[in-house]
Amino acid sequence: MKPFIKFFSSLELVIACMVLGLVLVFVGTIDQVNLGIHGATERYFYSFFVMWKIPNSEISIPYLPGGYTVGITLLVNLITGLFVRFRYSWKKTGVLMIHFGVISLLIGELVSSMMQVDSNMAIDEGATVNYSEDRTLSELVVIDHSHSATTDRVYAFPKAMLKTNHDVKHDDLPFSISINQFMTNSVIQRRDENTPAKSLIANKDIGLDYYAIETPKTGKMDEINRNTAILTIFDSMGNVAGTWLTSLAFPSQEFSFEGKDYSLQLRNKRYYHPFEIKLIDFSFDRYLGTNIPMNYSSMIELTNQERGEKREFLIYMNHPLRYNGLTFFQSSFTPDELTTILQVVSNPGRYLPYISCILIFVGLTVQFGTGLITFIGRRLKKS
Amino acid sequence: MKKRIPAIIALAIFLGYFASNYSKQSPRTEIDYTAFGKTTVHLNGRAQPLDSVARNALLSIQYKRTIRDEDGKKAPAIVWLTQLLMSPDLAHDRPIFKITDEDIRSLLQLPRKPSKRNGMLIALLGPGSAHFYYSFRELAPSLKTISEQAKQAGELEDAQRSRFQKAVLQLARGLSTYTSLSQTLHHGQVASFSQELKDLESFAPAGIDAVNKRQLGQEFDENDFNKIMNIGYLYQGFEQSAHFLSLPSKSESGEFSWEKMSFALSQILQTGQASEVARSYASIVDAYRNEDATAFNEKVRALHADLNAIDPSLLSHSGVELTFNFLEPFYIAAVGYVMAFIAVIISWIRSPQRMNQAAYWLVIACAIIHTIGLLFRIYIIGYAPVINLYSSAIFVGWGAVLLSLGLEKVFKNSIGNATASIIGFSTLLVAHHLSADGDTLEMLRAVLDNNFWLATHVTIITLGYSATFLAGCIGFIFILMSIFSNRIDKKSSRAFASMVYGIVCFAMLFSFVGTILGGIWADQSWGRFWGWDPKENGALLIVIWNAIILHARLGGFVRTRGIMAMAIFGNVVFSWSWFGTNMLGIGLHAYGFMDEAFVYLALFAGVNALVIALAAIPTRFWKSQI
């Protein structure tokens, strides 16, 4: 046990972790040019190992410890170091505070990396919306329109279930869905005489006019992965009802099955909120005589019927709305400036950095300040 | 007293240069260009004096802020701009378009212009290094070719453009600024602007009448109708080409609005006459065209009276900016830092005490001027000091100079003077090269427009950068000095070690706190603390590297030599975080994308790596015993 503790609390390990962290952050930043910020973050920082795929093979080997490995090792080292190596004295208050600050910073980032959820809420002027969409996750929804007179019933199958050659079904649905092919990213093209025969399997609705070609997935900020699924619906006897082409690029497609009306759509995963937001007005101000953006703002009205709340709020740059543990900030808008796009972030770890900031600031100031004062005192005595 | 003579002489020379540079800003001509240059106009989203418009436009075309007059004398940019605004035909002969690219020159079939200086440069650096200046008249026949090439280049992303295409785009932008400036105050279709306004005022009722009657289907005067339509077309083109806004007005709520000169037509059609400001401008244009300096100066005074009648703050604010332009504080400070460095070198070779004192006082004088420059910028734009890459260069230098002065005060070993002068000069040089795109006092994009966070996060982290760079410079000097000279002994090497340690601590404090504050800004604005954006990662690298240095020292893994080498590597990390991350062109912080700078960045990193390699030479081969 002892050698382990000694190893995990050693100063050498701190330095090794920091050097690895340095290399990792540098390499990860450079690779953002290829993978985009999101892609590189997943690969380098939110991973245990950075893998390298041997070209022309399926074998991947780790060549760098990932952000989790480095961060967690550092965390373990800091905590064991405090117990084993650290001899407390008044003089060391600063150092102690700095290290607690770093610990809370590391925990904060760990929590964020695992629990932070980002989604987008697009609202047209005058419209009201009660959900936000995850741009990185999709879901296949089947909506039963004949469920009752006033409401539809929505069956949603998350992306994780949509794998090529897998079946999905729900006990309340009279049919099963077989995924012929799932494409993480694709381009959609209109069918013509050059369309390859194997792309012609869809035989319903939009699939009769269009087909999809799979393309490599992207992690870049300004690009999206256009998920597409080709799926076949079977009745309980195993008879084919038809094959559909669904894609994030398409609206919902209606069909009837055994006399009931359904619609089918592949869409971004939705998070429904217990409140709704209406966009009263979006405005985009520029500096006079230029195209330099001065401000973007969305005047919204928030209604929460459960709590009987109704209020107006102006969301603008550096001034988000915080409500119900969520942060809504002005992220984008459509070119006609009639639709606002709010980014909705839920991050339970967001308070930890505030604590770290205070601890580290006070700790470093105390530590270096006392050092500086003693040093200058000695110099003055000498001269 | 005798000891102080070198310091007094050095300061006298420096301040003398400062004064003479200031006096050169006002040309000794009959026309009062200084007064005209103070006139407030609106460009790039802010009110500014014409003098600033002139300097920035000329800089983006000619890469210099002054022109050579016909007789070879230097003249300020406002002389050129006045001519271009009022008598473009005369300005078209000035060779101000700088073309360095050989391919452009051969494409446009431009002649090589022999000059002594070019001959020397070519001999030294090869044929590609020569550059030549061409006038608008020389380029005019090729305008179509240039715009076609620029259009092709414009369709590509910046990274895909060849050197030739970048140069063509640059030239096309310069030409566009130039032509629109020539049509900003007057469209130039008639000789007298005042007469034109008078004619318009008297003709307006008839013209409006013709248009109204035609709309109502009544009989109308066809000549009047055609005339007013032609005037309308002329002014439409005039409006599109104008470069800046020149007609201010103030609403009852106290807000300013600005219009282009072509708005005079609307004023006449609406109220029957042009505004006072428009009429004063018209008289100034006429006076210039008639070469009547007395009338010109008198009408400029009248224009200023008109502007003051709208709001006195207009001219007083642009007057401050004019003073800032005239002082050229960053240029002057850069000159002073060079002088200080020379004094330091002399002090190392002979008479250490006196020359070092001279260097110290020079650095203090430069630091004061540097600070004044920063304060002017803050006042003019109303934001905390660091708003773009240019101002960060100035601020990094400023922070390092102040820290160096502190070191010099404590250690008195001339190293603080050396680092102050080296960093002060080099950062101001970098800033100068970053300013070539034009106005550095730019309005902030929406996302950055927050003075609280600009003043805290940005300022603090930039000081962290300053300190990292300073520690690296001290390490740099230490390694070179101890290998190649015998000036370093055990005692002075200890002093070096404490200097670097102290500065690294400072860097650690400021870069760490600054980085976390940035995260908190991000959380406040976007609900996320850390986004792994390149600039954030760059700041993190600096924090980690400083932490590594401190822990390596704490654990006794490195001693003086190792700490120095590590501090020098801090320079590489610093330059990556400061510039390299911006070159990636991604993320929220990609506010200054540059690619030519990449060569310099690589060079800087290479030189530092070389000195780190030198530090690896066993100390027994060093000239100093540390």
Image: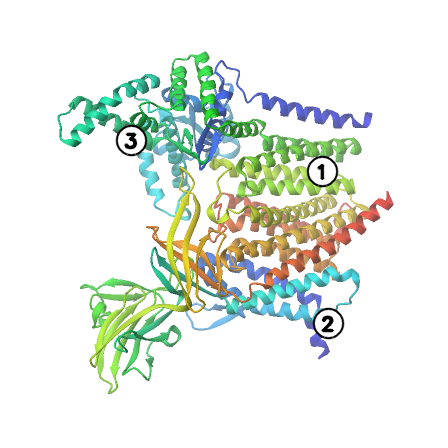
Residue A159, picture quadrant: bottom left
| Residue type for callout 3 | Gln
Q: Secondary structure at mark 2?
A: helix
Distance Cα–Cα, label 2 vs label 1:
45 Å
Q: Viewed as shown, does residue A237 lie left or right of B429?
A: left
| Residue type for callout 2 | Phe
- Please tell me the numbered disc located at residue B417: 1
Between B596 and B118, the one lying in front of the other is B596
Q: Secondary structure at mark 1?
A: helix
Labels 1, 3: front one: 3
Find the residue positioned furthest to the front. Answer: A308
- B204 up-or-down from B384: above or below: above
Residue B35 visible in the snapshot: yes
- A377 up-or-down from B405: above or below: below
Mark 1 vs 3, N-terminal side: 3
**Colour convention:** rainbow
Labels 2, 1: front one: 2
Q: What residue is pinned by disc 3?
A: B236
What crowding class fits label 1: few (fewer than 14 Cα within 10 Å), some (14-19), or many (20 or more)? many
Q: Chain of mark 1?
A: B
Q: Chain of mark 2?
A: A
What crowding class fits label 3: few (fewer than 14 Cα within 10 Å), some (14-19), or many (20 or more)? some
Residues under numbered marks 3 and 2 in contact, where contact means CB atoms less than 8 Å apart: no
Q: Viewed as shown, does residue B307 lie left or right of B320?
A: left
- Please tell me the numbered disc located at residue A83: 2
Distance Cα–Cα, label 1 vs label 3:
59 Å
Distance Cα–Cα, label 3 vs label 2:
78 Å
- B576 up-or-down from B243: above or below: below
Q: Viewed as shown, does residue A102 lie left or right of B491?
A: left
Q: x%, y% of residue A11?
A: 70, 66
